[in-house]
Image (tube, rainbow, N blue to C red):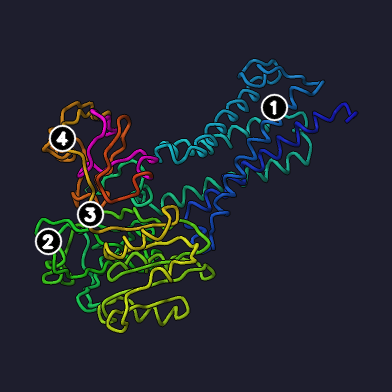
Amino acid sequence: MNDPHLWWYVSRASAMIAWALLTTSVLWGILLSTRVMRRVDNPAWLQDLHGYLGGTSLVMVGLHMVSLMIDSWLSFTVAEVLVPFATAFKPLPVALGILAFYLLVAVQGSSLMLKRLPRKFWKGLHYASYATLLLVSFHAGFTGTDVGSLWYRIVSIALILLAALAVILRIIAGKRSGSARQADAAPGGAPVQPVPRTMVVASATGLAHGIVGIRLKLPDGGMLPVWQPGSHVTLHLPNGLQKQYSLCGDPANRNQYDVAVLRTSQSSGGSSWIHENLVPGMSLPVSGPMNHFELEPAADYLFIAGGIGITPITAMIQSLPAGRAWRLVYAGRSRQTMAFVAELEAEYPQRMIVHASDENVGGLDLDVILGTVTAQVYCCGPESLMNAVAARVPAGRLHLERFVPLERSARPAAPIQVACRKSRLDFTVPAEESLLDALESHGVPILGSCRKGICGTCEVRVVEGTPEHLDSVLDDAEKDALGVMYPCVSRSLSASLVLNI
Ligand code: FES
């Protein structure tokens, strides 16, 4: 502690460590956010590592700044450390470093508040990480008192090359994902409106009794946007109906979208039209994919599928690394009505419980199945099954996808004063009109699809006011955390709403 250069050493060491951590954090974040690590087992702690690296780099920057003030030779003042151009010592490079510090604080702070911020805002701010790296490189290259030494040059060149590699990877990945942002952005992203693209029916095959599997491709056979397990697309049928179907199959296959359609007795005209009219070679507008049933990183999963609810689950299973712990409970009326049952059983005999009603006397015993389970539970199927699962699994571990609207109690409808911030429009929505209809009739750029609060197409961000969530898309708390609502069915608890549209 008596070495007069101690704080100088601390200042240099903390600066270099911060630079290295920041570079690694950016590179790591890019690997996680792109397809580079798709096939790698990618549990939550690997994702957290990105945040820890960034957070620790900020701590190191803090130590660097404090040691600059304590060091008896440099003895920076607080103002010189925090205010650009307040010092006479290499003012420009020091100012760049100070700017980098503020950007780093903003990036880290926004990540801590990720659940409270609109995802688009957080994402935009997160891109400032690249600017931070650039500023840090200039700062470190022109400020240090030992910039001319060989070791410093070697470390600097290595870090700058790594940073350049990160940027190149990001650019390549960005181009490859193309218009896939739509799927990535939801939920909670900016309300990216799905513009239908024309697709061709490549095949229509029976998958089980009453279920047809449809393969859709682009007319030129080109690559389709990336999709994540749990995503759905909307088929725009010639009879005017828009129907949502979960994507099944392998998300890594970018040349086709596969959906499976069950013919239902209560069909509103969608599934029956598809079963009776859809043939290979037919063109169809298709929008999406969108995802409100995301597979979050976890160490262990329990999938519960009822009937056609198996479709998003197959994609989830296919996307998991071989070593991941998971089990599937698949229930249906009979094996003849259960799509993919034979393939799944053949491939994963140890991981599956198949419950066909015609083979079992009693129903599915959820108390036994869920009794000691601590896994993340993903369930898709009939309402009765999802309600029974929801009654036994805590909300924090439960993930449901609904294709039938929940029955929700609403207050008596009242007029709402609505302000659309981007469109600069202000109007009153009468009690008898839906918010989505009113937005459309005033020319606000918004699309609706299901108009029942299940598909998520009409998502809009709420800037002010308290929405009355009446949809079935996400958990209400999740919607509030993301600051979104679905105006096709939802209304307002406050007299007015300000929407970011
Ligand atoms: S249009 Fe489907 S949720 Fe609103």
Q: Which of marks 4 and 3 is nearer the N terminus?
A: 3
CA separation in Å, label 1 and label 2: 66 Å
Task: Check contact, mark 4 vs mark 2: CB within 8 A.
Answer: no
Q: In this view, does 149 lie above or below 181?
A: above
As shown in the figure, which amino acid type bears the numbered disc 1?
Answer: Met
Q: What residue would you read off at disc 1?
A: 65
CA separation in Å, label 1 and label 4: 53 Å
Question: Is the residue marked by circle 1 packed among few (<14), some (14-19), or many (20+) residues within 10 Å?
Answer: many
Q: What residue would you read off at disc 2?
A: 268
Task: Check contact, mark 3 vs mark 1: CB within 8 A.
Answer: no
Q: Which mark is residue 443?
A: 4
Percent position (x, y) of residue 368? Answer: 43, 71
- Label 4 residue SS: loop
Of all residues, the one furthest to the bottom in this rendering is 359
Residue drawn at point x = 27 percent, y = 83 percent: 358
As shown in the figure, which amino acid type bears the numbered disc 3?
Answer: Pro
Q: In the image, which is nearer the foreground, mark 4 or mark 3?
A: 3
CA separation in Å, label 3 and label 2: 14 Å
Q: In the image, which is nearer the foreground, mark 4 or mark 2?
A: 2
Residue drawn at point x = 12 percent, y = 68 percent: 272
Task: Check contact, mark 4 vs mark 3: CB within 8 A.
Answer: no
Question: Is the residue marked by circle 3 packed among few (<14), some (14-19), or many (20+) residues within 10 Å?
Answer: some
Q: Earlier in the sequence, mark 1 or mark 4?
A: 1
As shown in the figure, which amino acid type bears the numbered disc 4?
Answer: Gly
What is the quadrant of the C terminus in the image?
top left
The answer to whether residue 498 is magenta is yes
- Label 3 residue SS: loop
